[in-house]
Amino acid sequence: MNRFTVAQLTDLHVRPEGVPAYRVAETNMLTERALRRVAAESPAVDAVIITGDLTDCGLPSEYDLLAGMLRRTLTMPVYLIPGNHDRREVLLQHMPATRSMAGGFVQYAVDDLPVRLVMLDTVRPGAGYGELCQQRLDWLDRTLAERPNQPTLIGMHHPPFQCGIAHMDGIALRAPEAFVAVIARHRQVRRIVCGHHHRPVVAQVAQAIASIAPSVAHQVQHDLSIDGPAAFVMEPSAFDLHLWDQRSGFVSHTVLVDSFPGPFPFLLDPDYPGCSG
Ligand SMILES: [Fe+2]
Ligand SMILES: [Fe+2]
């Protein structure tokens, strides 16, 4: 296959039925709408990854609700990893077919697609920040060494870089240098896609382009002041669509879930015939 698409949804923060997150964000409704938007994409999306904070509190009822939504809505393969709001054991029990590795980490490679997906578990239970312990880093190094020539996209919840939003930078991936050193040894890693910050952000990590996808639920307020308070806003729900083709490699699009007026044709203005869209 010369062309392949991976939709990245993140930070769904699903709650028990009828309960908004933080008393404001209707995360279940927003998640359902985002899943339907992915399902309606044409041409069809080939695979979906969900990069953590699947639920808000890691409750069995939250995972059951999400599992039902995924079952009803999507037919393509879906690959999950946890975020700091998840609980690994509950996730593994209630989300059928989620893969894990030794130690109970939800960390695995997907090798049966045209591009390789390597999904990392950056959760430290009980903490908002992320970590990759030596066991997970060693697994990553070994796993990447297995297929040095296959274009690889890494999915992880906590970003391995600082983005300038102070309260989120305080809970990013701790000690990212060790992770960056592993990535730098494996030049086939082209993209690192993250969640957690609830905003679209792009950076460079070693040779790879790294990005944070917007949340399908609430967004973190855009505030680059050094002492900005933690706050969220109900900016539009969105997800990232990573397109891979043999000529261009990975190209990423941010897709808004809402509908807007249009599409309209680019009609020429008869007074300015040289001006065309
Ligand atoms: Fe989140
Ligand atoms: Fe998070």
Image (spheres, rainbow, N blue to C red):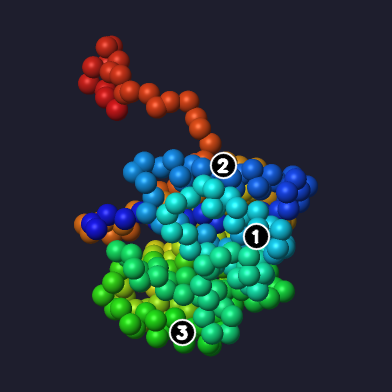
Q: Mark 3 points at which residue?
A: 139
Residue 42 shows up from this direction: yes
Considering only order in the chain, which callout, 3 or 2, is on the residue closer to the N terminus? 2
Measuring from the top left, give residue 255's x and y in whole percent.
46, 44
In the rendered view, does 192 fall on the left or right side of 112? right
Asked if residue 171 shows in the view, the reply is no
Q: Which of 54 and 189 is in front in this view?
A: 54
**Quadrant housing residue 62:** bottom right
Viewer-nearest of discs 2 and 3: 2
Task: Give the residue number, with chain letter if any, for mark 2.
Answer: 33
Which residue carries the number 1 mark? 63
Camera-near label (2 vs 1) is: 1
User: What amino acid is at disc 1?
Assistant: Tyr
Label 1: how many residues lie within 10 Å, few (<14), some (14-19) or many (20+)?
A: many
Q: Is residue 265 above or below residue 255?
A: above
Crowding around mark 2 (Cα neighbors within 10 Å: few <14, some 14 to 19, many 20+) is some
